[in-house]
Amino acid sequence: MRLREQDILPFYPIQENNMQIILLETLTKLGKAGEVVSVKDGFAKNFLIPQKKAIIANKKNLNDLNSKISQINENNMKKISEANELKANLDGKEINIKMEANEDGNLYGNIGPRQISDKLINDFSIDIEPGNIVLDNISAIGSHDVTLRIYDDISATLKLEVTKKI
């Protein structure tokens, strides 16, 4: 006798390991500051809560939410102003990356977000997470636009100049 998935599922329900949290800052793809959202346990326990980006949405924290909302909004406004300053510094900047290419100008590989992040740290001492760098498939020499998501809806655009490594 062979067991099928539909035979087992009624007896062993799959556990949904989701946790309700209150966001302390706006996070891309997750929600705005002050919202109550549901995320995986591990994401909340290992990343959001230790980095003070969220708190557990228990009864006490939900009752205190009204008093904390002004502090959350104040922190959010501070982050928005910092993001606008960073946007002003980054908009229109140009970075150059040298890559190996053939005679037609096609690269032997692609440029990824990690390379751009490392170049921003080296050139401007600005640390942008590779996950916040939006770029198309860059596989040829030339000038390309790169979008950097800084915070919430604030983003900057850089010029990326890809040249042939000699």
Image (spheres, rainbow, N blue to C red):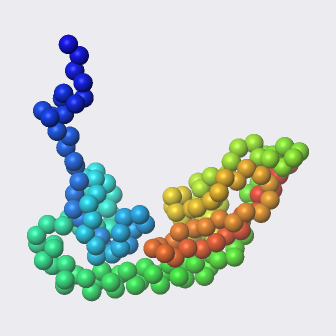
Counting from the top left corner in percent of width and height, residue 117 is at 59, 60
Q: Nearer the viewer, residue 13 or 100?
A: 13
The residue sitting at 16% across, 39% down in the picture is 13
The residue sitting at 58% across, 61% down in the picture is 134
Counting from the top left corner in percent of width and height, residue 20 is at 21, 62
Q: Nearer the viewer, residue 11 or 113?
A: 11
Location of residue 9 (image quadrant): top left
The residue sitting at 47% across, 84% down in the picture is 81
Q: Nearer the viewer, residue 6 or 137?
A: 6
Q: How many tags in the picture? A: 0
In-image side of 150 versus 61 (left or right): right
Quadrant of the rendering where the N terminus is positioned: top left
Seen as rendered, the residue at the extreme top is 1
The residue sitting at 37% across, 80% down in the picture is 76
- Seen in the picture, residue 48 relative to 15 is either above or below; the reply is below
Location of residue 156 (image quadrant): bottom right
Seen as rendered, the residue at the extreme right is 103
In-image side of 49 versus 57 (left or right): right
In-image side of 121 versus 29 (left or right): right
Q: Is residue 145 visible?
A: yes
In-image side of 163 versus 17 (left or right): right
Q: Is residue 99 visible?
A: no
Counting from the top left corner in percent of width and height, residue 145 is at 69, 66
